[in-house]
Image (cartoon, helix red, strand yellow):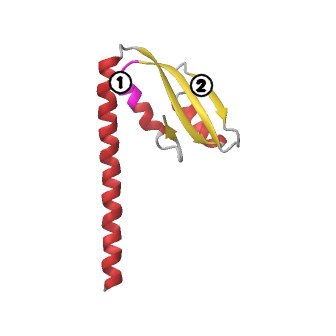
Amino acid sequence: MKVLKEAVSLQLTKKKERMSTKNDSQAFYAKLKTQLEETTQFPTLYMYKFIVPSSESKIQQVHKVFDNMGAVIDTKQSSKGTYTSVTITVNMESADAIIAKYKEVSVVEGIISL
Protein backbone atom coordinates (compact mmCIF):
# COMPACT_ATOMS: atom_id res chain seq x y z
CA MET A 1 0.00 0.00 0.00
CA LYS A 2 2.86 2.38 0.87
CA VAL A 3 4.49 1.74 -2.52
CA LEU A 4 1.20 2.51 -4.29
CA LYS A 5 0.83 5.80 -2.40
CA GLU A 6 4.40 6.75 -3.31
CA ALA A 7 3.78 5.90 -6.96
CA VAL A 8 0.60 8.00 -7.03
CA SER A 9 2.40 10.85 -5.29
CA LEU A 10 5.23 10.68 -7.83
CA GLN A 11 2.76 10.75 -10.73
CA LEU A 12 1.00 13.80 -9.27
CA THR A 13 4.33 15.56 -8.77
CA LYS A 14 5.34 14.92 -12.39
CA LYS A 15 1.95 16.15 -13.60
CA LYS A 16 2.33 19.35 -11.57
CA GLU A 17 5.83 19.86 -13.00
CA ARG A 18 4.51 19.50 -16.56
CA MET A 19 1.69 21.94 -15.83
CA SER A 20 4.11 24.37 -14.22
CA THR A 21 6.44 24.17 -17.21
CA LYS A 22 3.53 24.81 -19.59
CA ASN A 23 2.37 27.79 -17.49
CA ASP A 24 5.94 29.12 -17.31
CA SER A 25 6.21 28.82 -21.08
CA GLN A 26 2.91 30.64 -21.62
CA ALA A 27 3.96 33.42 -19.24
CA PHE A 28 7.34 33.73 -20.96
CA TYR A 29 5.78 34.09 -24.42
CA ALA A 30 3.16 36.56 -23.17
CA LYS A 31 5.90 38.72 -21.64
CA LEU A 32 8.04 38.45 -24.78
CA LYS A 33 5.09 39.50 -26.95
CA THR A 34 4.47 42.56 -24.79
CA GLN A 35 8.14 43.54 -24.85
CA LEU A 36 8.40 43.08 -28.62
CA GLU A 37 5.26 45.12 -29.29
CA GLU A 38 6.46 47.93 -27.00
CA THR A 39 9.99 48.15 -28.40
CA THR A 40 9.86 47.01 -32.01
CA GLN A 41 8.43 48.51 -35.16
CA PHE A 42 7.27 45.80 -37.57
CA PRO A 43 8.27 44.50 -40.01
CA THR A 44 11.75 44.13 -38.53
CA LEU A 45 14.97 42.25 -39.04
CA TYR A 46 15.05 39.84 -36.07
CA MET A 47 17.96 37.76 -34.82
CA TYR A 48 17.37 34.34 -33.28
CA LYS A 49 20.16 32.54 -31.43
CA PHE A 50 20.02 28.87 -30.55
CA ILE A 51 22.41 26.32 -29.09
CA VAL A 52 21.85 22.83 -30.50
CA PRO A 53 23.60 19.53 -29.81
CA SER A 54 26.01 19.00 -32.72
CA SER A 55 23.85 16.56 -34.64
CA GLU A 56 23.34 17.23 -38.33
CA SER A 57 19.70 16.16 -38.10
CA LYS A 58 18.98 18.59 -35.24
CA ILE A 59 20.71 21.46 -37.04
CA GLN A 60 18.70 20.64 -40.17
CA GLN A 61 15.47 20.69 -38.13
CA VAL A 62 16.26 24.28 -37.15
CA HIS A 63 17.11 25.19 -40.76
CA LYS A 64 13.82 23.71 -41.95
CA VAL A 65 11.78 25.99 -39.67
CA PHE A 66 13.23 29.01 -41.46
CA ASP A 67 13.19 27.59 -45.02
CA ASN A 68 11.92 29.87 -47.80
CA MET A 69 11.92 32.97 -45.59
CA GLY A 70 15.08 34.60 -46.91
CA ALA A 71 16.80 33.94 -43.60
CA VAL A 72 20.56 34.26 -43.20
CA ILE A 73 21.72 31.30 -41.10
CA ASP A 74 25.18 31.08 -39.54
CA THR A 75 26.47 28.14 -37.52
CA LYS A 76 29.52 27.76 -35.32
CA GLN A 77 30.56 24.57 -33.57
CA SER A 78 31.80 24.70 -29.97
CA SER A 79 35.50 24.07 -29.28
CA LYS A 80 34.81 20.49 -28.17
CA GLY A 81 32.31 19.92 -30.97
CA THR A 82 29.51 19.02 -28.57
CA TYR A 83 27.22 21.93 -29.44
CA THR A 84 26.55 24.18 -32.40
CA SER A 85 25.48 27.81 -32.18
CA VAL A 86 22.88 28.70 -34.79
CA THR A 87 22.24 32.39 -35.50
CA ILE A 88 19.35 33.25 -37.78
CA THR A 89 18.59 36.73 -39.08
CA VAL A 90 15.26 37.08 -40.82
CA ASN A 91 12.64 39.71 -41.59
CA MET A 92 9.61 39.18 -39.35
CA GLU A 93 6.16 40.75 -39.70
CA SER A 94 4.91 40.67 -36.09
CA ALA A 95 5.58 39.65 -32.50
CA ASP A 96 3.24 36.69 -33.02
CA ALA A 97 5.29 35.53 -36.02
CA ILE A 98 8.51 35.71 -33.95
CA ILE A 99 6.96 33.71 -31.13
CA ALA A 100 5.54 31.14 -33.56
CA LYS A 101 9.07 30.40 -34.79
CA TYR A 102 10.36 30.00 -31.23
CA LYS A 103 7.59 27.51 -30.60
CA GLU A 104 8.33 25.63 -33.84
CA VAL A 105 12.01 25.15 -32.97
CA SER A 106 11.23 24.22 -29.36
CA VAL A 107 10.43 20.66 -30.52
CA VAL A 108 14.10 20.10 -31.47
CA GLU A 109 15.49 17.86 -28.74
CA GLY A 110 18.14 19.58 -26.64
CA ILE A 111 17.73 23.04 -28.19
CA ILE A 112 18.39 26.12 -26.07
CA SER A 113 16.92 29.45 -27.16
CA LEU A 114 18.95 32.50 -26.22
Q: Residue furthest bottom?
A: 1
Write down the quadrant of residue 39 in the picture. top left
Q: Is residue 57 left or right of residue 109?
A: right
Residue in view at x 32 percent, y 84 percent: 2
Residue in view at x 48 percent, y 34 percent: 114
Calculate the distance from the C-alpha at mark 1 to the C-alpha at mark 2: 20 Å
Name the amino acid type tagged 2. Ile
Image position, residue 16 (x, y; %): 30, 59
Name the amino acid type tagged 1. Ala
Residue that label 2 marks: 73
Q: Is residue 31 left or right of residue 55?
A: left
Q: Which mark is residue 95?
A: 1
Residue in view at x 66 percent, y 31 percent: 76
Image position, residue 36 (x, y; %): 34, 23
Residue 59 position (above or below residue 2)? above
Residue in view at x 54 percent, y 18 percent: 70
Quadrant containing the N terminus in the rendered view: bottom left
Residue 80 position (above or below residue 34)? below
Write down the quadrant of residue 104 in the picture. top left
Residue 45 position (above or below residue 62)? above
Q: Which region shows up in magenta?
A: 93-99
Image position, residue 29 (x, y; %): 34, 35
Does the segment drawn in magenta span residue 37?
Answer: no
Disc 2 is placed on an element classified as strand
